[in-house]
Amino acid sequence: MHRHVRHGMAERQGSGRLGLGMQVWPSIKGRCMPLLPVHSLFVPQFLSQTLSACLLCATITTIHCVLQAYHSIYTRDTMAPAAATEHVPNGAPAQEPVKTKCCHCKCTSTETNGVNGHDETKPEVGRATTTNGDAKPQDTPEDKKDEPTQTDKKTDTDTRDSATKDGDADTAATDDKDKAPEDQTMKCEFKHLDRRYDEKDEHYFTERKTEIDKPAQKDWWRLYAYCLVKHYNHHGEHDSTRLYVNPQPLRQLLRDVIGDYPSDPIDVDDVQIEAPFHSLFHYRKQLETEGSRRFADEAEAFEQFNLLMDWIKNHFEPEIAAYERCISGETRAISYEHAWTLLPPDTIVHCKILDQDRAFRVRRYYNEFDDHANLVGMTLSCRYIDFDGEDVGTLRSHLTFRKYTGVVQLSELDIVPLHLHEDANGIRETLLARGRKWEKHLGQHYVQYNGLAVIKKEMQGYARFGVNGRVMIDCATFHRLAADHSFTVKKLPSSKPKVPSLSSIKFTSETKEYEPLTDEQAMMTNATVRGYSFTNKRFLEFFVDKLEPIEWNTSCFDGLVLDPTIKRTVQALVSNHTRERPGFDDIVKGKGQGLVCVLHGPPGVGKTLTAECVAEYVQRPLYMVSSGDLGCVSSELDAQLTNIMDMTATWRAVLLIDEADVFLEQRALHDLHRNAMVSVFLRVLEYYTGILFLTTNRVTTFDEAFKSRIHIPIRYTDLTFESKLQIWKNFCGMVPGGVDIDERGLERLAEHDLNGRQIKNAVKAAESLASFEGVKLDLARLLQVTKIQSVFEKDLSSVTGVDYTAPGGRVRDADRRNMFL
């Protein structure tokens, strides 16, 4: 027995770890039996190389090689199939067996190319099949046909190296570029994709694998029913995630059920729902009901519909559980993370603003962050019903839903869905009653108000004012003269025939028609109406629940102590001016249409009371202003007078300018400042169309230009005994509970030298004194207060007054005038 040794096998394998430095090839009697080819699926490649083509040679392999071979078998099993198919393209014909020759024993064996253990990139070619060790026949044509050329070997090597380097994924992507998928049937599944931009600034869709190139077919992703697509911007940064819905029946279903969802509307031709997909959560029940009915007889659409519903339930599983616990549990509570589930679009929420119940319709919500990008809560974009002076419509408002920790009861939240409020029915009744009252005060209304009024500040918040008096509700004039606070509503769509608005006063020349509000719209009306306070001289917002009708005192004109002839003249002029009929006009149209009355005389004789009684008699607003309110600069006077006369003419009010001496006084040659003020007053007065009363104590200093502009001058003198007696009777009759006094007592009171204003003050002071002592007002207390007034008048009228606190002052004089002695 002899041994033939082959060296260099370790170098060919590229691994010295296997310890296959040499292999032993035994031969018996120079003859060997050929061994069947060893397939790579069962024997690793390196092991097949260690086995001889002879059966006897394989039996004498060393124990070390056998152990190494078995170890390698287990590590090679998983790679063998890939290796087998890697170089045999699908559909390619099987290669002809290559006949090889044992190098020493001259035996022959038939092996498949790529399995015989030789380097595949350098196959052994040119070996001929012989019958003995010496003869070497020529290659047949068939052998030459199967034998690769040198060029073929290089091409095959480069191709396989490139395939090994790029991987199977790139090969698959390249195939997709070359041709569209043969199967165009839509797959009922969710596909996770990326939407990116190429070097030409065109977007494309690709699977979420970084090694996959841009597909040549742009619409291949439409073969999947649903695609969850991550959008990337031009810089490769993640921008958003969207759900693409491809089946047309499902698109139509989403459009019909969800519609124009705020910030994420449904377009039936291209449905893209942006994360976090809140629209699918809010409308999941409607989708399930409508989809089950619509697709009951359509198998494919029903399968796609069920896939979407299953995804919604799985995706929102925690949110659905939290929502169901909140609305169905005995204690309604929810965490901030799940609070959005209670706020689908068009939900009516309740909150308190300025201590007033309010209802808003939520349109959308979004997160709110502070300057350090920390989440502080949600901002709710809402709508409510308001009036801009021209139309009734919706107005936008933003509510802040503050972030909180833990699970909180709904009753503790500032903003709660109205249907989940613990007193939902009571809140609805309150809101509806106030809304109907708000609806009645559209247009111009002169009403009584007693309470808090507000106005928005320039930055934020409200300025508050206490108002106790009569106010004019007029949003149109509010917008015109307080332009900083103006706004415009989105007009409500008309659905019913129009009816006239309800007006409680008669001084409007036109009746605006407004469509009645529904109950839901009435609940969402504003809690305030806009107008003007005659006591505060401001445009303000007044709370609707504080508005009350005016109780007109039409009999006050009868109680006015004035000459009957003058009284009848004033009544006639005022009544005629307030009638709705064309009257006498100037040559220049619109000039001199006002009614100007000058009331001159000493203080306290009834000048101001006359203007007040006229306003009550004609049931008109009374606008009282003094010279101090108008300013002392001609430019300020012009602006103030223009605005005031604009308002009073619009409301057909009675304008009273008290103590107007500075505007009526004779102009001087060198006093340019006062001359400018008089000129401004004359010009504005010429075009005033309302009723104007001017009071003054110095009629002798009137400018000549005013005399021709006065329609009726009324002179007041000091009160006579009869006038004072009547005034005492009038004021004593107004005391609550009455006065314990007879006619003789009233005459004793009238003997004191007091004017009308002093008599009123005396009655008021005596009534307060009697109330403090807990007794009924009587003559004694009236005389006590009257005595004090008389002494004060004597001190004022004396030439030399007495300083009772000065050194040397007589105590007797002080005691004599002490009201308690």
Image (tube, rainbow, N blue to C red):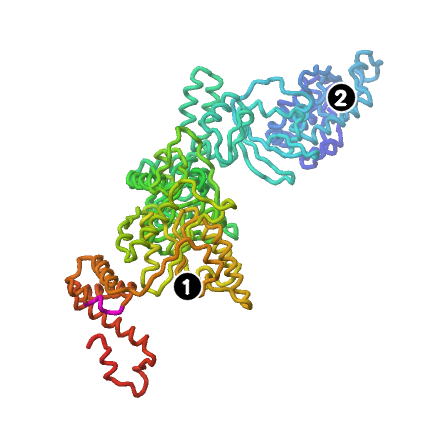
Q: Is residue 96 above or below residue 276?
A: above
- Residue 690 makes an appearance in the image: yes
Residue matched to label 1: 699
Q: SS at mark 2?
A: loop
Q: Give the residue at x 61% y 37%.
A: 232
Q: Give the left or right position of residue 643, taking residue 784 as reference.
A: right
Residue found at the far bottom of this picture: 808
Q: Give the residue at x 48% y 35%.
A: 262
Contact between marks 1 and 2 (CB within 8 A): the answer is: no
Find residue 102 and name its label: 2
Q: Which residues are magenta?
A: 748-753
x and y, in percent, of residue 694 in the image:
41, 58
- Residue 60 makes an appearance in the image: no
Please identify, in this view, whether the residue under mark 1 or under mark 2 is nearer the observer: 1
Quadrant occupied by the C terminus? bottom left
**Mark 2 neighbour class, 10 Å CA radius: few under 14, some 14 to 19, many 20 or more:** some
